[in-house]
Image (spheres, rainbow, N blue to C red):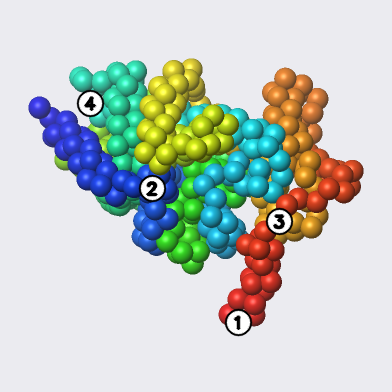
């Protein structure tokens, strides 16, 4: 038995121990399972958003791009960090104060039922897309770490067992507490691997001298300024509107904790993508002709066996942390917005929790099947996440300018987002901007505005929403 096998085995056992122990915290109200009873502290919010963001796309996907395009690939994770900071500074407090469970629930509260239905479909679809990428990255990591034990496909199966099992047993408590381990492990592992790789190749000067292409160490050239801007726009959009992210803020103990956790998490995220990209550049120098997706695992397995085991376990931990939040939020969307809203409004807390667990298992298996068809981690991710522009427009207008919102605005904006994405893929003539995210923002903003002009029926509001702007202004003046 290799050192790497032992390390991964211990890590999996520890994850399931944490999940099993977390079950005691999920008893009673269903809210304890899906939102950790709204009792999460700043450290738990921080590691939860870092754990969600720094997954396969940030580590394996970042190194994959850096293998060809250089250190500028690190901007992908930095964009995640900037998105989390914007979320913390703008709407994290407001979401937490509304006492909702899901984004579609908010849509029905202020707009109408069909907006909620459209929101459910799009949110689940996007999250299943992102979730599928974690299977791809997880299978790649395990196949590189333990090639005598796993192929990419069997590694994906093992990843599915852990993702689904850990999430189903302990819910939000399990996901957040596990992230204390996962985030610590991934940061220590990747940083230690970077240090050892630099030493192995002869120092930073030697690495720069051996760069296969001139742009490898340029912070902008490589992926290019427009791609970096696209990542930033997309991931700020996502942080304002994706259910798995919003669910983390909704689990905070107070509105202040929600805000602080996101800002701190965003700051912690900023460097890790560049470290992964740096490792991808080193791999490009050592292993010419390698499949880019294997760049980071290949480099790490060449290091000291103990460090290799720890680091690849850390990369797998990155996948676990992302996958658990995505699965939980997808299950919550089904139980809260479909089962409780349309099938059994009087469901008991015990049955609600059971339905959520069943949904987690079913959606986990669905995403595994979808994952078998995916290639190009970050490119695939960007397409799916562009749909979040519609939610961002709706949320920002609802929370900051409710008097300019029409009851019909949410539904038609969501429909416009789907039509725009389909047109981008099947009607090349509409590609008048560099990326679909920009077209989504333009179309969704115009659609929402037109709806306001056409319909005079204002959205529903409540005291929590109406008092936010005045209170925010008072707080800012005191600060």
Residue 282: name its quadrant. Answer: top left
| Comes first in the chain, label 4 or label 1 | 4
Distance between the alpha carbons at the discs numbered 4 and 1: 57 Å
Residue at position x 52%, y 47% in the image: 101
> In the shown orientation, is residue 17 left or right of residue 400?
left
Measured as percent of width and height from the top left, residue 62 is found at 45, 39
| Comes first in the chain, label 2 or label 1 | 2
User: In the rendered image, is residue 207 in sight?
Assistant: no
Distance between the alpha carbons at the discs numbered 2 and 4: 41 Å
Instruction: Identify the residue under disc 1.
Output: 478
- Asked which secondary structure carries label 2, the reply is loop
- Asked which secondary structure carries label 1, the reply is helix
Instruction: Identify the residue under disc 2.
Output: 29
| Numbered mark located on residue 146 in the image | 4
Q: Nearer the viewer, mark 2 or mark 1?
A: 2
Q: Is residue 416 above or below residue 236?
A: above
* Crowd around label 2: few <14 · some 14–19 · many ≥20 (10 Å): some
- Asked which secondary structure carries label 4, the reply is loop
Q: Nearer the viewer, mark 4 or mark 3?
A: 3
User: In the rendered image, is residue 385 in sight?
Assistant: yes
Residue at position x 80%, y 47% in the image: 406
Q: Residue furthest bottom?
A: 478
* Crowd around label 4: few <14 · some 14–19 · many ≥20 (10 Å): some
Measured as percent of width and height from the top left, residue 426 is found at 72, 20
Residue at position x 87%, y 49% in the image: 456
- The quarter of the picture where the N terminus appears is top left
Instruction: Identify the residue under disc 3.
Output: 461
| Comes first in the chain, label 3 or label 2 | 2
Q: Residue furthest right?
A: 454
Measured as percent of width and height from the top left, residue 129 is found at 52, 29
Distance between the alpha carbons at the discs numbered 4 and 3: 55 Å
Q: Is residue 137 above or below residue 408?
A: above
């Amino acid at each position: 038995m290799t050192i790497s096998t032992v390390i991964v085995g211990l890590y999996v056992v520890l994850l399931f121990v944490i999940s099993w122990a977390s079950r005691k915290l999920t008893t009673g109200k269903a809210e304890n399972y899906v939102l950790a009873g709204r009792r999460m502290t700043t450290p738990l919010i921080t590691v939860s958003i870092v754990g969600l963001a720094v997954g396969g796309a940030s580590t394996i996907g970042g190194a994959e791009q850096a293998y060809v395009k250089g250190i500028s690939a690190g901007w992908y994770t930095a964009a995640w960090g900037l998105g989390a900071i914007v979320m913390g500074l703008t709407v994290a407090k407001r979401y937490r104060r509304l006492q909702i469970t899901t984004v579609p629930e908010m849509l029905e509260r202020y707009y109408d039922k069909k907006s909620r239905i459209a929101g459910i479909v799009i949110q689940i679809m996007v999250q299943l897309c992102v979730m599928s990428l974690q299977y791809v990255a997880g299978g790649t990591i395990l196949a590189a770490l333990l090639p005598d034990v796993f192929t990419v496909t069997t590694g994906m199966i093992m990843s599915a067992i852990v993702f689904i099992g850990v999430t189903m047993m302990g819910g939000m408590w399990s996901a957040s507490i596990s992230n204390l381990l996962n985030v610590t492990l991934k940061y220590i592992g990747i940083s230690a691997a970077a240090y050892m790789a630099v030493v192995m190749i002869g120092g930073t000067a030697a690495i720069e001298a051996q760069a296969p292409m001139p742009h490898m160490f340029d912070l902008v050239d490589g992926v290019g300024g427009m791609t970096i801007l696209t990542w930033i726009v997309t991931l700020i959009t996502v942080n304002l509107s994706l259910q798995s992210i919003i669910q983390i803020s909704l689990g905070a103990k107070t509105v202040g904790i929600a805000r602080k956790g996101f800002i701190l998490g965003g700051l912690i995220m900023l460097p890790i993508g560049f470290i992964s990209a740096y490792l991808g550049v080193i791999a490009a120098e050592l292993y010419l002709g390698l499949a880019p997706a294997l760049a980071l695992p290949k480099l790490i397995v060449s290091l000291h066996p103990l460090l290799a085991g720890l680091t690849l376990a850390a990369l797998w931990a990155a996948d676990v942390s992302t996958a658990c939040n995505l699965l939980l939020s997808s299950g919550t969307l089904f139980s809260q917005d479909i089962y409780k809203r349309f099938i059994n409004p009087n469901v008991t807390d015990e049955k609600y929790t059971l339905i959520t667990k069943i949904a987690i298992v079913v959606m986990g298996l669905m995403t595994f099947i979808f994952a078998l068809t995916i290639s190009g981690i970050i490119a695939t991710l960007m397409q799916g996440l562009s749909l979040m522009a519609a939610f961002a427009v709706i949320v920002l207008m609802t929370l900051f300018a409710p008097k300019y919102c029409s009851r019909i605005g949410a539904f038609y904006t969501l429909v416009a987002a789907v039509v725009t994405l389909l047109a981008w893929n099947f009607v090349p003539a509409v590609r008048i901007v560099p990326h679909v995210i920009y077209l989504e923002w333009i179309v969704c903003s115009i659609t929402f505005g037109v709806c306001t002009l056409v319909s005079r029926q204002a959205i529903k509001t409540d005291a929590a929403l109406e008092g936010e702007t005045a209170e925010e202004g008072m707080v800012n003046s005191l600060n």
